[in-house]
Image (spheres, rainbow, N blue to C red):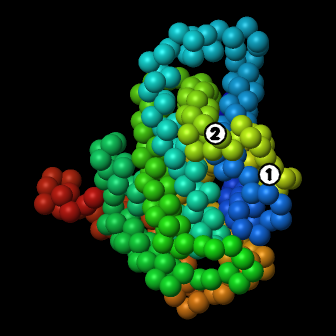
Amino acid sequence: MLSMASQPVSAAFKLYCLSVMTLVAATYTVALRYTRTISSGDLYFSTTAVCTTEVIKLILSLGMLARETGSPSRLKNSLVEHVLQSPKELLKLSVPSVVYAVQNNMAFLALSNLDAAVYQVTYQLKIPCTALCMVFMLNRSLSRMQWFSVLMLCAGVTLVQWKPAEATKVQIEQNPFLGFVAIAIAVICSGFAGVYFEKVLKSSDTSLWVRNIQMYISGIAVTLFGVCVTDGANVMEKGFFFGYTPWVCFVVFLASVGGLYTSVVVKYTDNIMKGFSAAAAIVISTVASVLLFGLQITVTFASGAMMVCVSIYLYGLPKQEAAKLPQYNADDTEVKQKLITV
């Protein structure tokens, strides 16, 4: 995929990537919700699912690096140089590994207590969280339109959470407040880890797949530790893959490939297209929740979800729109101070 970076990308390819990412995001959320609430059989350990996902991501990244290097010898040299001989880099990438591990486990906790559609809308709080991390960690700034869209998004999420929609077909006991707290932690982790990883990527010319491998190696160690601390005794008694069904394996698969498609979408598409993707995922999750979980759509939920979708679109508007404003003298410092650029 990286070899395509210097080649022109067709609109059809962009549409394909966005369609896949949208379906993966929506299906992952709905499928995870299904496995945690109404799926028959023994409930699996979420910590082992997170750990298994990290292992699969490592394998996929190794495959992509092998494709990028072109030969087994170059692959070996790259791994020796950047993994075995770079303990400091592994330590540096262990930071997002820990944060992502917390985020992924919070997703399981949130979807055990909130409907998939409510989760999908509320999880968009990662946008303002990421924006704030970019401001403080990468010294970037936001346009007035972006700040306005952030406020609108927060207002929309507030409406959705004001009186959380109930799913009539879910029989387990749920705690909406706990679910919201879990999402809050997840979005903070998502924003910080994403910006931190971007900063690490831009600090050197090291391959994206090398960085992923460094992060996933640390991630496996971190998530294994989480398995031992949280479910160690139960795993020893019942087995690592206790409760795994085809649906659980499907969830793990979606979580593994979702990150790869996200990186492709970030590389080859713009913010408007990503905004439409996020909005489409919300719509798909809502429809699926009504059909599968008996979600009862309320006025506050519908209004909040609509506000979130509009805010995502406004946030992604290209900064070039500022060029349509009346032109001013470049020496007019007062005017320049009024214009906020990213």
Please indicate whether residue 114 sits to the left or right of residue 41 in the image.
left
Amino acid residing under circle 2: Gly
First in sequence: mark 1 vs mark 2: 2
Numbered label attached to residue 31: none
Of badges 1 and 2, nearer the viewer stands: 2
Q: Residue at x 45, y 34 (%)?
A: 95
Considering only vertical position in the picture, is 319 above or below 148? above
Q: Residue at x 75, y 27 (%)?
A: 63
Q: Residue at x 77, y 43 (%)?
A: 238
Residue 201 on image: x %, y %: 48, 32
The residue tagged with tag 2: helix, strand or loop?
A: helix
Please indicate whether residue 249 sits to the left or right of residue 106 in the image.
right
Q: Are marks 1 and 2 in contact (CB under 8 Å)?
A: no
Residue 341 on image: x %, y %: 32, 55
Q: Residue at x 71, y 84 (%)?
A: 168
Which residue is denoted by mark 2 in the rendering?
232
The residue tagged with tag 1: helix, strand or loop?
A: loop
Considering only vertical position in the picture, is 46 above or below 145? above
Which of the two residues, 242 or 238, is positioned nearer the viewer here?
238
Which of the two residues, 49 or 161, is positioned nearer the viewer here?
49
Q: Is residue 106 visible?
A: yes
Q: Is residue 145 visible?
A: no
Q: How many marks?
A: 2
Residue ranking furthest to the bottom: 299
User: Could you give the CA–CA distance between mark 1 and mark 2, rounded to whole angstroms?
Assistant: 15 Å
Which residue is denoted by mark 1 in the rendering?
243
Amino acid residing under circle 1: Gly
Which of the 4 image quarters holds residue 150? Answer: bottom left
Residue 116 on image: x %, y %: 65, 70
* Label 1 CA crowd tier, 10 Å (few <14, some 14–19, many 20+): some
